């Protein structure tokens, strides 16, 4: 069994609240009886891409478990690279792939500098084709990025999803090794299908964004009351993908039902 945790939309902003929520999530993952084999952080690491915010994120996300992060629309590629990857500053897409046991995880940079919506450029598609060509012929693959490639019935998110999703859908549908696509951005746990595979949207550690059935513009957009939450993705010996969404209580574990 391979266990991959997904943390998303941490929005480090130099305030204590968001940082403490991520620290609680990381402690929860570290204390699991079966620790994750890797932790994926699917974008909007920071709230405004400042170098100081990435320094805060680097400390809070430090773990004995491998942590692999990708940028979102609130991130800055140059600062992301220098602070989190230890690379020279550059504004080109931040794409990287990792082997987790027999699993290949391809992290795609769907951010567009200066814009809220997302897209995968030609450079990223060329890179992804190379990753798929190099991946084991019978090994499972997960794709991860920030922007969902579908509408989620979210009045805020549906206008800033992934552009040209049909191109990616055709690629996903054409490769049986791809088990699913993981995204963030929506600040709401959600599941649907895309290219004939599961599309799994992770919750945010920072807040919950309302859907069309509950949103009342311009107010009541974000709900900051719920505890942070994570997604836990399991790839079993049959190469089946199962996902659990788990809230992480800020008050800790309570094993006895309150009276």
Image: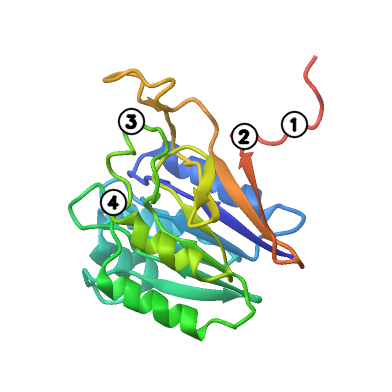
Which label sits on residue 254?
1
How many neighbours does mark 3 have within 10 angstroms: few (below 14), some (14-19), or many (20 or more)?
A: some
Q: Which residue is mark 3?
A: 155
Residue drawn at point x = 37 percent, y = 51 percent: 147
Mark 1 and mark 3: Cα distance apart in space: 35 Å
Q: Position of residue 114 (x, y in %)?
A: 17, 53
Mark 4 and mark 1: Cα distance apart in space: 36 Å
Residue drawn at point x = 52 percent, y = 75 percent: 98
Residue drawn at point x = 37 percent, y = 71 percent: 95
Q: Which callout, 2 or 4, points at the residue further toward the start of the chain?
A: 4
Q: Position of residue 29 (x, y in %)?
A: 64, 52
In the rendered image, is residue 247 in sight?
A: yes
Which label sits on residue 249?
2
Q: Relative to 9, does residue 41 appear above or below in the rendering?
A: below
Q: Relative to 12, does residue 241 appear above or below in the rendering?
A: below
Task: Give the side of residue 247 with respect to residue 75, left or right.
Answer: right
Mark 2 and mark 4: Cα distance apart in space: 27 Å
Mark 1 and mark 2: Cα distance apart in space: 9 Å
Disc 1 + disc 2, Cβ < 8 Å: yes
How many neighbours does mark 2 have within 10 angstroms: few (below 14), some (14-19), or many (20 or more)?
A: some
Q: Which residue is mark 4?
A: 73
Extreme residue toward the left, this view:
114
How many neighbours does mark 1 have within 10 angstroms: few (below 14), some (14-19), or many (20 or more)?
A: few
Disc 1 + disc 3, Cβ < 8 Å: no
User: Which numbered disc, 3 or 4, marks the residue closer to the eye?
Assistant: 3
SS state under label 4 = loop
């Amino acid at each position: 069994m391979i266990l991959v945790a997904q943390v998303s939309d941490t929005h480090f902003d130099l305030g204590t609240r968001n940082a403490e929520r991520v620290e609680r999530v990381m402690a929860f993952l570290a204390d699991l009886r079966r620790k994750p084999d890797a932790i994926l952080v699917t974008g909007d690491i920071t709230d405004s891409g400042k170098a100081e915010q990435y320094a805060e994120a680097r400390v809070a996300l430090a773990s004995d478990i491998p942590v692999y992060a990708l940028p979102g629309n609130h991130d800055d590629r140059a600062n992301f690279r220098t602070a989190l990857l230890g690379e020279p500053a550059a504004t080109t897409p931040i794409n990287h792939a990792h082997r987790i046991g027999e699993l290949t995880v391809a992290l795609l940079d769907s951010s567009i500098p200066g814009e809220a919506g997302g897209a995968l450029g030609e450079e990223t598609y060329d890179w992804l084709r190379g990753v798929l060509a190099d991946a084991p012929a019978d090994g499972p693959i997960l794709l991860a990025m920030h922007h969902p490639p579908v509408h989620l019935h979210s009045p805020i998110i549906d206008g800033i999803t992934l552009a040209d999703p049909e191109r990616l859908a055709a690629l996903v549908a054409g490769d049986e090794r791809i088990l699913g696509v993981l995204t963030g951005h929506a600040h709401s746990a959600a599941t649907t299908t895309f290219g004939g595979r599961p599309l799994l949207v992770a919750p945010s550690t920072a807040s919950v964004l309302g859907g069309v059935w509950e949103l009342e513009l311009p107010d009541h957009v974000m709900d900051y009351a719920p505890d942070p939450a994570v997604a836990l993705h399991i790839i079993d010996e049959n190469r089946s993908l199962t996902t659990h969404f788990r809230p992480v209580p800020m008050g800790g574990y309570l094993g006895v039902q309150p009276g």
